[in-house]
Image: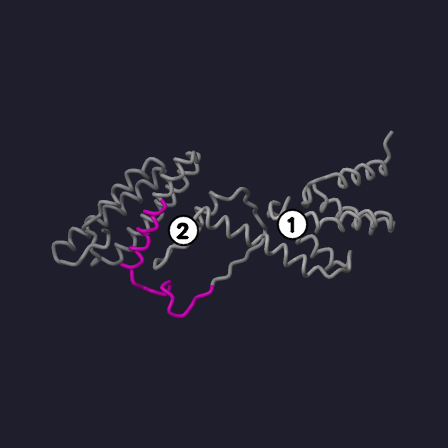
Amino acid sequence: MNTFDDYLEKIEKMASDSNTLGLKGGIMGVVLFFLYYQRFTGSKQYEEIALNLLENIPARISVNDPVDYANGIVGIGNVFRFLIEEKFVTIDASDFFDDLDEIVLRKLKSDIVNNELFFHENIVHEDEIWNVKTLLNAQKVMFIDFNYYFYRRREGSIMNSDNKVFRVKSLLEVAKSLYEYTEDMQKRGTSKEGIAGIYRRIFWICHSVGSLVFQNKTTTFFKFDYFSRLLIKVYPALSYSQQRYCLRALCVSLVLSKLDYETSSNLSICD
């Protein structure tokens, strides 16, 4: 019959032979376990096992390793920092952390370029596009029970503009970009549920456009072909209440554009 010490010996051997360095099911997770078990038992034996395993990790890290928290470099770096802060180990790991940062940054830059995760310039609400693209390109999504949001308002930023025409232009540009992205996603085989999620976001944007138009009755919306064509595509993915709101937004916009066109020669914002 196996004793608990037998299981610990097996864990040590599996970690020694493992090619997985990460926190979940890898060497780093085993290191963390043995160091805590040493504090629980007071036995230096388990500390020696942990430190022997830990010693070999920096040299085995590769630029091709995953960078996620559970199995990759981010998790390894955070555990290393935790072990130093909690005085499990006393080492100067600044060079090691710099190397990890460089690998993670290189990976992030590569993902940004390859997936075209750029913010559109000279519009507001551009994060609507970036958020959707980022979420759909993510291999994993983690929910953290922590509320954090830092928003810096720069003096002179276009985000401070109260120009409703400019805001409507931006929203229509965002809606158009999102719809074009759905066409690309369909070619890549993205699920219908994922596409429908983007369509519902486009609905919200269209509804916001309608609300802004209603508040600013002098805005010209004569050339509204794009909005109507878009709505035809988006419409089947919406719920009944969403369909009603979206149709109301379109109808209000069309009525106002007709009234404005009859009394003004201003240029349409929806070319």
- Please tell me whether mark 2 sits on a helix, a strand or a loop: helix
What is the C-alpha distance between the residues marked 2 and 1?
29 Å
- 1 sits left or right of 229 in the view: right
Q: Residue furthest bottom?
A: 155
Residue 165 included in the magenta stretch of the image:
yes
Instruction: Identify the residue shown where x is 55% and y is 56%.
Output: 147
Q: Main secondary structure of the magenta part?
A: helix
Estimate the x, y position of residue 39 in percent, counting from the top left: 82, 52
**Three-letter code, disc 1:** Gly
Instruction: Identify the residue shown where x is 25% and y is 43%.
Output: 228
**Three-letter code, disc 2:** Glu
Estimate the x, y position of residue 188 in percent, counting from the top left: 42, 36
Estimate the x, y position of residue 89 in percent, counting from the top left: 77, 57
Q: Which residue is mark 1?
A: 75
Who is closer to the viewer here, 190 or 125?
190
Instruction: Identify the residue shown where x is 86% and y is 38%.
Output: 5
Start-end of magenta stretch: 152-178
Quarter occupied by the N terminus: top right
Q: Which residue is mark 2?
A: 128
- 134 sits left or right of 104 in the view: left
Callout 1 crowding tier (Cα within 10 Å): few <14, some 14–19, many ≥20 = many
